[in-house]
Image (cartoon, helix red, strand yellow):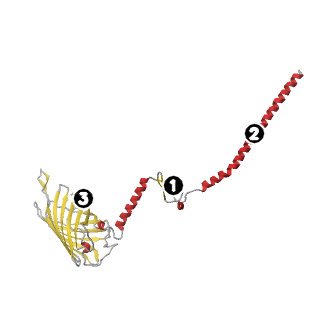
Amino acid sequence: MKRIVCVALSALLCCVGSAEAEKQQLHKGADKSVQREHTLTVATSPREQHVKAVAEDFHITPAATPDHVIGEGGPLVMDRQETKTVQYSDVDAVNRAINAVAMSNVSNAMYGAKGKPWMRRTTLSFQFQEGWKPLYSVETVQPLGHYDEKSRDVWFTQQRISRASDIGTTLNVGVGYRRISKDDRRLYGAHLFYDHRFLRHHYRLSGGLEYMSGESEFRFNWYGSASDERVLDTNLHTLERVANGYTLEYGKTFKNARWARVYVEGYHWNQERQADKNGLRVGSELQLTPRVSVDMGYNKPEHNSGGAYGKITFRLAGSPVAWYGGKHSVEGAMSVRSKMLSLVRRHNTIWVE
């Protein structure tokens, strides 16, 4: 019995010793793994720190790169404050470039020292008719062929389109000829016009003569119907026809105030169903700024009460003469050279009865 107990105790002690030995080996292996990992960490830590430092110090500076860098998705615009990159499409870049060039050209043409000649001869206007009815129009006069400051004559064309609430759209197309004397003090002119009112399709022909000498201007215009009577109401037998007539005008400018012009005009319109319409218009034109002018006056028909009228005109390019922002007088005050391509002054509205 004692022998059996001794054998069992010996076996138990052997097992315990083996387990302790295995435990010590495991601890040694774990210590070696930890030591190896620590060694790797120590070995790689300086490299990581170097890479991290380089990454933190790396950025794109505005001085080292252009403002626009072309990439696969389009131009890249560098933000100079936060070193960020904003990307937009190629179409946007082209549109911005086109807009910049277009606006630059328009600005130079309209606000340059001289402006484009054709723009100086093109106007936009807003005026009040009888009964304070508004009328909007665009008008231009341009030479046909070459013209410069040495030319003695010029052929020109004048076009105008207007819109009013009561008479609709009216188109005026004309051609004219002007000749200036050798001393540039006298000007002779003649012109023909075709007028078309789209409402009820009324047509009219017109012819006129001009004579300008120094500060004085004389004009005569004749107007004749080119369309038949139009039926407005068959039940009431209401008809409408274009009135024939003529106007005679005298205008005057001033030597030391070339921005101002005064005029007086007499008119006569033939009417078949009622008394002819005669009257007198007295007014003034003032070039307030190089681009803005006003025309205002008083219209007094015969046998009827009169009324005021007015018009505001905007030039696409500035005039050298103006009350504010322009010259008040010009060299050669008696010269009429500047009027060679001025607008023909006439009645553009077709009068009907």
Q: Are marks 3 and 1 in contact (CB under 8 Å)?
A: no
Name, please, the residue furthest toward the left: 272
Q: Which mark is residue 29?
A: 2
The kind of residue tagged 2 is: Gly
Frontmost of labels 2 and 1 is 2
Residue 5: quarter of image: top right
Q: Secondary structure at mark 3?
A: strand
The kind of residue tagged 3 is: Arg
Residue 32: quarter of image: top right
Frontmost of labels 3 and 2 is 2
Q: Which residue is at the front of the view, 162 or 267?
A: 162
108 lies left or right of 33 = left
Identify residue for label 1.
85
Frontmost of labels 3 and 1 is 1
Q: Quadrant of the N terminus?
A: top right
Give the alpha-carbon distance from disc 2 to disc 1, as whole Å: 53 Å
